[in-house]
Image (cartoon, rainbow, N blue to C red):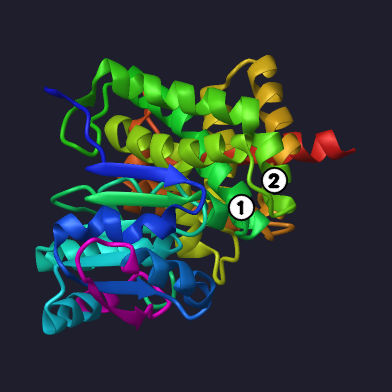
Amino acid sequence: MINTLAGPGKYYQGENALLELGKLVSYLGDRFLVLSDDIVYPLVKEKIEIGFSGSEKPLKWSYTSYGGESTQVEADRVGALAKEIGAVSIIGIGGGKLLDTAKLAADESGLPVVIVPTSAATDAPSSSMSVVYTEDGIFVVSKRMRNHPDIVLVDTTVIAGSPLRTFIAGIGDAFSCYYEARACKASGAMNYNGGRGTALAYHIPEYCNLILRENAKAAVASVKNTRWSEALDRVSEAILYMGGVGFENTGCTIPHGVYNGMTAILRPFGAMHGEAVALGVLIQLAAEKVPNDEWNDVVSFYRTVGLPECFAGLGVPNITDETIMQICEKAVTISPNVHKEPFEVDAKLLFDAIKTVETRSKESRQ
């Protein structure tokens, strides 16, 4: 099996980076379709207009509003519109599901895609993966695009003004990368590029974890106060670049697999992706039966930044054993990720791990 390392074509990050939009995308052509939503777009419209006007050659662009869910139907609509107006590229500006739609629409239309995350809620922007859901938000499939984003542009001033909860969720998503990569390396599991990670690929999640541990607390304070800081900049890179390149080149395991089970069973499911994945890390550690010092170290980090330690933290209090088992049975059925651990995973093992997490959380609060 070959070793692989892949990532976005170009990655730009900095304060007010959107003001450079036109200069950075003009090599792709002169007409663009901007996909955003009616909440985000008014907040960044002025920057977009200034950014496009800063190009050395005239650029044309059209705006379309996101349909609200990352479905195949929505991706088809956006792709068809891009072809209709003669766009040379689709620019997705917004949150994770919107960006997934932009990727899928561009991939199926044969167009380059520019990804502009307006929050750091997940580690998806730098990856070639697009997650498709039903109209009701139920996970359907993770699709791998033929290419990574041609450009990822991160305006960390915009990130500083994003909702605090989304930022903390992004920390949770990126934090999982190290633990999932560790398990995949131990099992020899294949990554999303059809091989195993290179030496550097496995070091990226390690460094991502280090950056989060050293800077997450200060970065959370920055977003809470809507203030840019070096800590915010470092954590944004850890979430949006290291986490994305890290998971794609090493693999995902129980955290993401259990998340898929949660979205299928818990209806409605109000937790954010990164919140649920963070809880999934604890479930993985319980399944691995890690020493108490490692368990306590992770829980201590969670409490520092405000990540959930149990289902109550996801807005699901008093979860029943029946519901837990349904989640576990669905996870082992629909998600290959849970089977990438260096040991056999079945519904009972996941059930026991979740019960351990719930028990430890309850005991720690008493």
Which residue is pictured at 52% across the width and 45% down the height? Answer: 277
- Quarter of the image for the N terminus: give it: top left
One can see residue 80 in this view: yes
The image quadrant of residue 99 is: bottom left
Question: Is residue 269 placed above or below 42 in the rendered structure?
Answer: above
Q: Nearer the viewer, residue 249 or 261?
A: 249
- The percent position of residue 314, horizontal first and vertical second, equals 65, 55
User: Which amino acid type corresponds to the residue marked 2 in the rendered image?
Assistant: Ser
User: Which amino acid type corresponds to the residue marked 1 in the rendered image?
Assistant: Ala
Question: Is residue 125 placed above or below 211 in the rendered structure?
Answer: below
Q: Which residue is mark 1?
A: 160
> Looking at the image, do the residues carrying marks 2 and 1 touch, with CB atoms under 8 Å apart?
yes
Neighbourhood count class around disc 1 (C-alpha, 10 Å): few under 14, some 14–19, many 20 upward: many
Q: Is residue 359 magenta?
A: no
Relative to 300, 77 lies left or right: left
- Quarter of the image for the C terminus: give it: top right
Which residue is pictured at 85% across the width and 39% down the height? Answer: 365
Mark 1 element type: helix
- Tell me how far mark 2 sits from mark 1, CA to CA: 7 Å
Instruction: Find the magenta span and give its range.
Output: 53-76
Q: Which residue is mark 2?
A: 222
Q: Is residue 68 magenta?
A: yes
Neighbourhood count class around disc 2 (C-alpha, 10 Å): few under 14, some 14–19, many 20 upward: many
Which residue is pictured at 51% across the width and 42% down the height? Answer: 236
